[in-house]
Amino acid sequence: MARATREAPARRRVATPRRRRSGSVFLFGTLIVLALLWLVYWYGASEIASAVRDRVTAAAAARGYAVACANAAEGGFPLSIDVSCSRASFAGQSSRISAVIDGVSTTAPLYRPGRVEWIATGPLVIDAPAGGIGLTATWRKAEASVNGGINGFSAGTTLLEEVRIALPPDRRMLSYAGLALSSAYLVVAPAADEDYSISAAAKAVALESDDGRTLPEIDVEAELAALAVGNSLGLDPRRVLSDWLARGGSLRIDKLSLASGDVSATQSGTLTLSPDGKLSGNLKLVIAGIEKLPDLVEAFRPGSRQRVAEVAAALVAFSKPVETPNGQAREMALIFRDSVVSIGIIPIGVIPTLPF
């Protein structure tokens, strides 16, 4: 009995390495299977990406546009599908519009299905003689991403830093040679109740004058919500937006502000956008530094000070004083009727029809 007891530990020592070897073989086999499955996954995703690229090119050609990608390269194995062009171009045969960008790279991380990221390298040159449009844009950073799923696109983000847009002498608008900004972003994402939130901002926006004058910088910020759009933008966002407009698309403006120095204007309220791109509704407008508004506009449009002073006086007459975190301001109601904007019974301007 004592001998049997002494032999038991020896039998246990012999059995342990066998179990360890079996576990190692199982783990090694599992890793091989997973690696093969990932290889098939990556290859399938690569084929889908190639098919999508071919479909986009064919669809553009069917509409009279030519899309080209010089020195195209694909890769990213094993974590992503990467496609890059050292020079991408777009040209319309009938509309005589063309665009050329120095480089574009696209990444679809396979560990985040449904996400696609872009990085663009400037410059970007756009030329449309028929529309009198022409520009060259450069930047330090230009990135964008979209998220989607089986229902199509759901959200998107764009980020820009240190952007400058130069206009050629024969295409300049209102005597401006170009525009520069330090940073800008745009975020579109689903919100509660099938709404879509839109957040955007542009910092230190500076127009460049033809005559070399230094113009004031402007900051722009927007917080909006497109109401009852749906839970996804689908595979055809334009059609989704057209359907939303046909249902009487409503846009809630939580904040829309422009600020330059001591002058700022902030709007909030709800507008309805008609299928033909016209706005109707009411907004609350709060203007700070209204007494300095004539000087600000004069800097952009010399000779306008007197006219703007008259408008500012009318704004004071149809407004009430309010206190804001930044001091005293004037509050008034803006009325939109088919894109005609009025303060009380006085029309002050027309908003251009929005293209949809």
Image: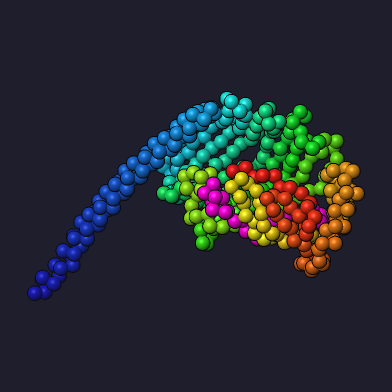
192 with respect to 110 (left or right): right
> Eyeballing the image, is 80 above or below 226?
above
Specify whether residue 216 is in view: yes
In the image, residue 344 lies at what x, y percent?
78, 59
Residue 68 appears in the figure: no
> In the image, residue 68 lies at what x, y percent?
53, 28
User: Depth check: 153 or 304 in front?
Assistant: 304
Instruction: Give the residues in magenta.
Output: 241-266
- The residue that appears at 67% across and 44% down in the rendered structure is 353
Residue at 30 percent across and 46 percent down: it is 32
Question: Where in the figure is residue 99, as x and y percent of width and height?
Answer: 61, 31
| Residue positioned most to the front | 345
Quarter that holds the N terminus: bottom left
- How is the rendered protein coloured? rainbow
Depth order, front residue of 87/193:
193
Which quadrant of the rendered structure holds the C terminus? top right
Q: Position of residue 24 (x, y in %)?
A: 27, 53
At horizontal 61% and vertical 36% (from top left) the residue drawn is: 121
